[in-house]
């Protein structure tokens, strides 16, 4: 289920490669490479890379924000939860393989194949009205565009609309 309460599991064995998500630190960006809408294959990439759809905000036993997706990484005996947000700036477009905002998100070219475009980014606020007086928070109307994607930790509101 991607970004909103998603359970994505990546299992690793042996030594972790440099791009292995088990090495991720807060602020690192991730690409979901697996096939299908519910991938389990993540890799660390530079945040400016076109495929960097997610940003890891913390490692935790549980992500405390309904908007944060997460990835479980590690071995079967020891899984670590990475709490994720979209790595988005104004003008970025995303393709959502399973519903918005659940499922795997991929950054794509802003054309009709994109699911949504980020029209505004407001750091430091959890106020959905920055996207417009009548624009709903995605948690209330997940299939409607335009919409606001509100992260509480860290405080950030993304405005999304049709590409």
Image (cartoon, helix red, strand yellow):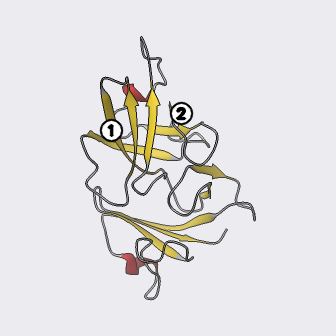
Q: In terms of depth relative to the viewer, which is nearer, 162 or 75?
A: 75
Which residue is under mark 2?
41
Q: In terms of depth relative to the viewer, which is nearer, 136 or 76?
A: 76
Q: Residue at x 31, y 32 (%)?
A: 80
For label 2, the crowd category at 10 Å Cα-Cα, with few meaning under 14, some 14 to 19 and many 20 or more, is many
Q: Compared to 138, does 36 lie above or below?
A: above
Q: Secondary structure at mark 2?
A: loop
Q: Residue at x 64, y 63 (%)?
A: 115
Residue 10 in picture, x, y percent from top left: 46, 31
For label 1, the crowd category at 10 Å Cα-Cα, with few meaning under 14, some 14 to 19 and many 20 or more, is many
Query: Do labels 2 and 1 touch, CB within 8 Å?
Result: no
Q: Quadrant of residue 50?
A: top right
Residue 101 in picture, x, y percent from top left: 50, 61
Horizontally, is 62 left or right of 16 in the view?
Answer: left
The C terminus - image quarter: bottom right
Residue 125 in picture, x, y percent from top left: 31, 68
Residue lying furthest front in this view? Answer: 76
**Res. 26 visible in picture:** no
Numbered-mark total = 2
Q: Residue at x 44, y 36 (%)?
A: 9
Which residue is under mark 1?
81
């Amino acid at each position: 289920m991607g970004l909103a309460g998603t359970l994505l599991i990546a299992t690793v064995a042996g030594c972790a490669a440099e791009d292995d998500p088990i090495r991720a630190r807060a602020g690192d960006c991730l690409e979901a490479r697996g096939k299908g809408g519910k991938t389990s294959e993540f890799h660390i990439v530079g945040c400016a890379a076109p495929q960097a759809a997610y940003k890891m905000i913390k490692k935790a036993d549980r992500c405390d924000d309904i908007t944060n997706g997460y990835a479980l990484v590690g071995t079967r005996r020891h899984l670590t939860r990475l709490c994720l947000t979209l790595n988005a700036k104004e003008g970025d477009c995303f393709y959502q393989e399973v519903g918005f905002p659940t499922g795997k998100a991929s950054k794509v070219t802003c054309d009709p194949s994109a699911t949504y475009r980020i029209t505004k980014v407001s750091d430091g606020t959890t106020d959905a009205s920055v996207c417009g007086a009548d624009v709903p928070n995605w948690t209330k109307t997940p299939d409607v565009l335009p919409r606001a994607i509100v992260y509480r930790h860290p405080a950030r509101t993304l405005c999304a609309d049709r590409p």
